[in-house]
Every structure is written in structure tokens, then in C-alpha cells.
Image: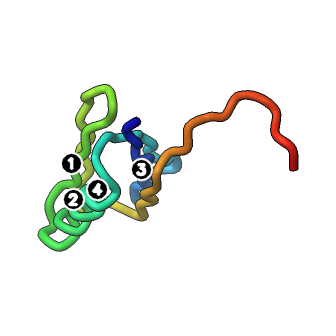
Amino acid sequence: MDQTVEVNIGVQNVAREIALETDASADEVSKALEAALAEGGVLRLTDTKGRELLVPGRALGWVLVGESEKSRVGFSQV
């Protein structure tokens, strides 16, 4: 079973965050982010539905990258 990566992006001067799930690994997302910041370029990510997200590196406020957990159904004992 493939694991998706959840990415939350805060854009400067924008109240809402951008949230997406991608099939790219966390390392691939981190490398794309580092390249966008270092080169003053564009962060380019593709979500699980094939849609492309482009954010200028200079507009990034913060980025949270983590693996998505699949929802569990049923009861659990704590």
C-alpha cells in the first residue's frame, strides 16, 4: 500500500493555508521546497488527483510535510 504525504503551506499575507496530499515522498517535497527557496524559484507540487500547485518561493511563509495516516474504522481500547 502506497503512503501519501500531506503538505500544508502557509503563504505570506494569506489567511488560509493550502493543504494537499501528494504521492511524492517527503524527501522529494523537501528537495523541491529547498530548491524553490534557494533559487528564488517556484515550489511545484502535484497532488494525488494530478493537479499541479505552483507557489512562488518568495511568498512561502511556512511548510509542514508529513505522512498521512489512513482513517481507522472501529473501536479501540485505550
Residue at (40, 36) in percent of width and height: 1
Q: CA distance from mark 2 to mark 3?
A: 12 Å
Residue at (34, 57) in percent of width and height: 26
Residue at (23, 45) in percent of width and height: 54
The answer, for residue 29, to whether it is visible in the render is: yes
Q: Which residue is mark 1?
A: 44
Q: Image quadrant of residue 75?
A: top right
Asked if labels 4 and 2 touch by Cβ distance under 8 angstroms, the answer is: yes
Residue at (37, 38) in percent of width and height: 2
Picture layout, residue 43 above or below residue 37:
above
Q: CA distance from mark 4 to mark 3?
A: 8 Å
Sequence-first tag of 2 and 3: 3
Q: Mark 2 belongs to which amino acid?
A: Ala
Sequence-first tag of 1 and 4: 4
The answer, for residue 58, to whether it is visible in the render is: no
Q: CA distance from mark 2 to mark 4?
A: 5 Å
Q: Mark 4 belongs to which amino acid?
A: Val
Q: Which residue is mark 4?
A: 29
Q: Is residue 72 left or right of residue 51?
A: right
Asked if labels 3 and 4 touch by Cβ distance under 8 angstroms, the answer is: yes
Query: What element does badge 3 sit on?
Result: strand
Residue 9 placement (x, y as % from top left): 42, 53
Residue 23 placement (x, y as % from top left): 31, 40
Q: Which numbered circle lies on residue 7?
A: 3
Sequence-first tag of 1 and 2: 2
Q: Mark 3 belongs to which amino acid?
A: Val
Q: Mark 1 belongs to which amino acid?
A: Arg
Query: What element does badge 4 sit on?
Result: helix
Q: Which numbered circle lies on residue 32?
A: 2
Picture layout, residue 36 above or below residue 25:
below
Query: What element does badge 2 sit on?
Result: helix
Q: CA distance from mark 1 to mark 2?
A: 7 Å
